[in-house]
Amino acid sequence: MYVSIIIPTFNRAGFICRAVDSVLKQSFEDTQLIVVDDGSRDDTRRLLSKYNDKRLRYIYQENRGVSAARNTGLDAAKGRYVAFLDSDDFWLKHKLRQQLFFMSRTGFRISQTFEIWTRGGKRVNQGLKHQKSAGWIFEKSLRMCMISPSCVMMDKDLIREGKYYFDEKLPACEDYELWLRVTLEHPVGLVPLALTVKHGGRSDQLSRKITGLDLWRIYALKQILEQKNLPADKREGVLSALQEKAGLYISGCLKRGKEEEALRIKELALQLSGQQRAAERS
């Protein structure tokens, strides 16, 4: 098969079939669909057992988080390319065909599409800060995650070469951390078509369930700083983003009376900044 599609899911019985159908009904059919069920306790297994399509592979694992689920899918992927789809999102019919054509024509090893945002079944407009960019987007990605997993397609060899797996130690912002590592070394293509539909605004979404997301962005940036191949000009941008996110997180902690946590992160930010300055002088 040419493209392996990975759908991680956890208790999304109300959405999983829509996501699966959007893959199996693609106009490009040379695919492998891997659904990694991360310990669902709802009807997910029963619903997926009704599909009679050799392209679909269902993998069940004990709950380990979305990063582990995606990594399990990557290990099982046999395609020339890998694409991700969150279980509450779906694709328009020609998503894969259009994206493959774009990548073959431009030579990008990773690309994403534009997306349509919906909340409560209604389309909503994206803010300017969420507009996607193409090319070398590392600096832009420091401020906020500029790549949506459901929009991405990657050359499988790129994943092997860069060991681009999701960090299973991060309970959130794992995609932010991965895309920083990728964009540090590779340009990202952008298909000029909205081919992915993203369904947001629900209470079961990870971004709603986990408070203090800036904490995990801080840890993600810490890991980027610790990379041996980080150029000096990129280091300055990472430090600036880390200080900004630390400031936001500390402010939130102080508002909630979490003085010890605020002090801990303040000391961490100062320590990281001091280490980097010392490395620059040596």
Image (cartoon, rainbow, N blue to C red):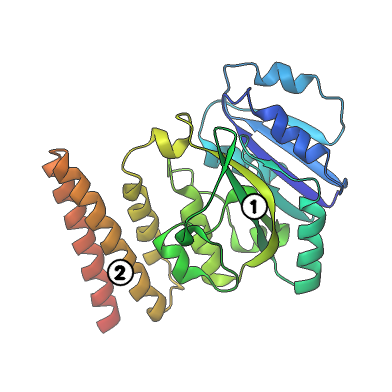
In this view, 111 is above or below 13? below
Amino acid type for the residue under numbered disc 2: Ser
Instruction: Determine the residue positioned at 24% across, 76% down.
Output: 277
Q: Nearer the viewer, mark 2 or mark 1?
A: 1
The quadrant holding residue 254 is: top left
Q: Is residue 282 visible?
A: no
In this view, 15 is above or below 172? above
- Closer to the chain start, of discs 2 and 1, is 1
Cβ atoms at labels 2 and 1 below 8 Å apart = no
| Residue corresponding to mark 2 | 240
The quadrant holding residue 152 is: bottom right
Instruction: Name the foreground residue: 51 vs 74.
Output: 51
In this view, 69 is above or below 94? above
Residue 108 on image: x %, y %: 70, 69
Q: What is the number of the mark on residue 22?
A: none
Instruction: Name the foreground residue: 28 vs 195.
Output: 195
| Residue corresponding to mark 1 | 151
Q: Residue furthest bottom?
A: 281
Instruction: Determine the residue positioned at 84% across, 36% down.
Output: 55
Instruction: Determine the residue positioned at 51% across, 63% down.
Output: 181
Residue 266 on image: x %, y %: 18, 56
Instruction: Name the foreground residue: 7 vs 276.
Output: 7
Judged from the image, the secondary structure of the residue bearing numbered disc 1 is helix
In this view, 199 is above or below 188? above
Residue 231 on image: x %, y %: 43, 78
Amino acid type for the residue under numbered disc 1: Cys
Judged from the image, the secondary structure of the residue bearing numbered disc 2 is helix
Crowding around mark 2 (Cα neighbors within 10 Å: few <14, some 14 to 19, many 20+) is some
